[in-house]
Structure formats: C-alpha cells, structure tokens
C-alpha cells in the first residue's frame, strides 16, 4: 500500500510500486487534465508538481508523471492542474488566456505546471530563466507562449 497526497487529499493505492503516476492520475483518479503524449519524458505534457518536505517547508518542482513510479511519490504531495485552480485560475493561466496563447490546449496543462513550479522555486526570476524552464514543453501548435510569459 502506497500513500501520498494528491491535490491535498490522502490517496492510498494498492498497486505495484512500479505503477506509473500518470496512469494513476488519469485512469484511477479520473484527473484527465494531465495529458499523455510521448510517455518518454520528452514532451512535458504530463507535468505535475511534486512537493517534498525540505528544511521544514514544502518545496515544489515540476516532474514528468509518465516517468515517475508510484514508489517514488509515496509520502509526497502530487499536485495536478486540477489542484491549482479549484477557486480561480492562477496568474500563469490568466496570462495564457489574455494573450491568446492557447490553441488546441493539449500542451497547456503541462506548461502551466512547469511555470508554476518554476515561479514557486524562483519568485524573483526573469523572463529568460522562465523561458529556459519550459524548454522541454513542446507545443505542436507553435503558440506564442513567450508573449504570455512576458506578462507574468
Ligand atoms: S507524456 Fe511526454 S513527457 Fe510525459
Ligand atoms: S496549443 Fe496545441 S499543442 Fe500547444
């Protein structure tokens, strides 16, 4: 039995430790906002936040859920796109909307989670660093994400 927090709810999964987090999120928990594309860690569509207790506080970073086995998230806090906007969309999502930087939207959840993780860890960071942080998030529609990022 593996236990972890998923969007602030305790989850207990009686699955092998090798079960993939992306499958648990989408197929066992019905949280389909996290997208599945390459399943090889190459596109960023499946990114979620992983919170670890470090020096007495929770530190979050974005991770590819398609590469993470259940055993690696036991005791951690996993946050999906559904977990960051239960009350309202966050400033990154608002910037993407305001600048028309969404087309099919398939890459959008991963991009939002990557940027959310980046700004949580680097609140004073600049545009170049933020752009580098999402270098692994592929957008097949070639949407103008950079314009939106300049306004966050
Ligand atoms: S599905 Fe492409 S990185 Fe996970
Ligand atoms: S908006 Fe379509 S893949 Fe990015």
Image (cartoon, rainbow, N blue to C red):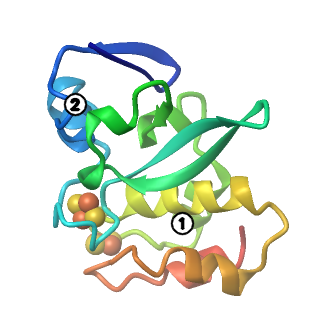
Looking at the image, is mark 1 or mark 2 earlier in the sequence?
2
Query: Does residue 134 appear to the left or right of 91 in the view shown?
Result: left
- In the rendered view of the protein, which quadrant contains the C terminus? bottom right
Query: Does residue 60 appear to the left or right of 151 in the view shown?
Result: left
Q: Secondary structure at mark 2?
A: loop
Residue 141 is labelled as none
Q: Residues within 10 Å of mark 1 (few under 14, many from 20)?
A: many
Within 8 Å: ligand 1 and the Cβ of disc 2? no
Q: Secondary structure at mark 1?
A: helix
- In the rendered view of the protein, which quadrant contains the N terminus? top left
Residue 96 is labelled as 1
Query: How far apart, in angstroms, are the residues tagged by discs 1 and 2?
Result: 36 Å
Query: Does residue 87 appear to the left or right of 110 in the view shown?
Result: right
Identify the residue at image location x=19%, y=55%: 36
User: Against 46, is 101 above or below?
Assistant: below
Residue 75: percent from left, percent from top:
48, 24
Identify the residue at image location x=57%, y=83%: 132
Q: Would you say the residues marked 1 and 2 are in contact, meaning their CB atoms lie under 8 Å apart? A: no
Residue 92: percent from left, percent from top:
61, 59
Residue 51: percent from left, percent from top:
57, 38
Q: Which residue is mark 2?
A: 17
Can the viewer see residue 24 in this picture? yes
Can the viewer see residue 94 in this picture? no
Q: Quadrant of ligand 1?
A: bottom left
The quarter holding residue 57 reads top right
Query: Does residue 61 appear to the left or right of 56 in the view shown?
Result: left
Identify the residue at image location x=48%, y=26%: 7
Mark 1 or mark 2, which is nearer to you?
2
The quarter holding residue 71 reads top left
Q: Nearer the viewer, residue 110 or 56?
A: 56
């Amino acid at each position: 039995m593996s236990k972890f927090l998923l969007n602030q709810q305790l989850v207990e999964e009686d699955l092998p430790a090798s079960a993939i987090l992306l499958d648990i999120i989408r197929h066992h928990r019905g949280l389909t906002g996290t997208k599945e594309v390459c399943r090889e860690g190459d596109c960023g569509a499946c990114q979620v936040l992983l919170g670890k207790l470090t020096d007495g506080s929770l530190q979050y970073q974005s991770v590819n859920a398609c590469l993470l086995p259940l055993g690696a998230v036991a005791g951690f806090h996993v946050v999906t796109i559904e977990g960051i906007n239960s009350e309202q969309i966050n400033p990154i999502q608002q910037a993407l909307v305001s600048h028309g930087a969404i087309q099919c939207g398939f890459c959008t959840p991963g991009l939002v989670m990557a940027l959310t993780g980046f700004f949580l860890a680097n609140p004073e960071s600049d545009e170049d660093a933020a752009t580098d942080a999402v270098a692994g998030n592929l957008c097949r529609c070639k949407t103008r994400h950079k314009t939106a990022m300049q306004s966050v």
